[in-house]
Image: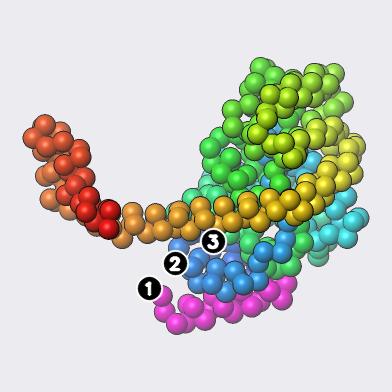
Amino acid sequence: MVTETTEEAAARLVESLLKGNRRAAGRVISAIEDGGDAVEMLMRALYPHTGRASIVGITGPPGAGKSTVVDELIRVMRADGRAVAVLAVDPNSPFSGGAVLGDRVRMMRHATDPEVFIRSMGARGHLGGLALASHNALLALDAMGFSDLLAETVGVGQSELEVAGTADTTVVVVPPGLGDGVQAIKAGIMEIADIFVVNKADHPQADRVVADIRDVLRMDLKRPEWTPPIVKTVATAGEGLEDLWIRIRQHRRYLEESGELERRRRARLEQEIVEIAERRLREQVLRPRTATPEFRAMLTDVVERRMNPYEAAEQIVPKTAAAG
Ligand SMILES: Nc1nc2c(ncn2[C@@H]2O[C@H](COP(=O)(O)OP(=O)(O)OP(=O)(O)O)[C@@H](O)[C@H]2O)c(=O)[nH]1
Ligand SMILES: [Mg+2]
């Protein structure tokens, strides 16, 4: 139930976040993760303060070195005067809140830096979908005043691609020595990469991977204005990260100057509105009409061939209603 006190509590919490209170930020992100009614109230208070930060998505197969790259990138970005917030999203992890142990250890040295914020997000909750939850969490960090947001997502599945889709710039980290080479990560992910990082460049197979990616890019004629650069890094030695940061800034400039940033953000928001509306339709229209004894009886009719699925759907949402 939306009561005035919870609305006020949400506004107060956001007020506190806007002043830079990390505990408040943690609570806001937890509420966003839970995906309950509070999200709407929080976003009402947060949204006017968002839209300033750059969002960089970092994705790639497990163990590619994403967290090590992020940790080193934070160092380079801090030296450049940026305030950096990191959200590590793992759709396969049941854990949430705080950082995943490995990441926490890895990024520990930044823990006392007031201009760095690190948080992880697991698969718990997310009634509205992980992509929406992680994007809303990034918006909260944007409102808090971080100039640059890094979203690390593990893996190359559908939900990871969706999370990556909410970033302005997507960095795909590819390690050498994948069984099938680049083919193994090709599906879907090559298309979303704005920048490739071939990490573990200390590995003898690294140049082979660079050549493989070049081959794939040569066949990709969809992006005449921006050819994704390939950056080699040895994250464990801190090598190549300055170059990566230069490329990220170049991509940002390209996005702004070409109008592509505006287009991407517009398309993403359109998708988001439609998703929220779809969920509402499902919950408020479809669910009540399918959670009835009449529906169970109709289902039996369909199972026993007395009715076909189209006729049954017509009983739930008549064509005339759908058209109107
Ligand atoms: N040789 C070498 N090892 C690296 C390099 N970068 C990272 N590693 C090692 O690779 C392992 C995985 O690194 P992470 O940064 O945790 O990789 P990740 O992609 O974040 O892993 P997940 O989040 O579990 O998918 C660690 O043992 C790192 O020390 C590198 O440039 N060279
Ligand atoms: Mg990681």
Residue hosting label 3: 32
Residue farthest to the left? 306
Residue hosting label 1: 1
Question: Can residue 65 be seen in this snapshot?
Answer: no
Question: Can residue 28 be seen in this snapshot?
Answer: yes
Q: Where does the image place residue 296, in percent across and percent down from the top left?
A: 15, 45
Q: Which residues are magenta?
A: 1-21
Q: Nearer the viewer, residue 165 or 137?
A: 165
Q: Where does the image place residue 321, in percent across and percent down from the top left?
A: 24, 56
**Amino acid carrying mark 3 in the image:** Ile
**Amino acid carrying mark 1 in the image:** Met
Q: Secondary structure at mark 1?
A: loop
Q: Nearer the viewer, residue 263 or 179?
A: 263
Q: With 161 as the anchor, is 255 left or right in this view?
A: right
Residue hosting label 2: 37
Q: CA distance from mark 3 to mark 2?
A: 9 Å
Q: CA distance from mark 2 to mark 1?
A: 8 Å
User: How dense is the environment of label 3, judged by Cα within 10 Å: few (below 14), some, or many (20 and up)?
Assistant: many
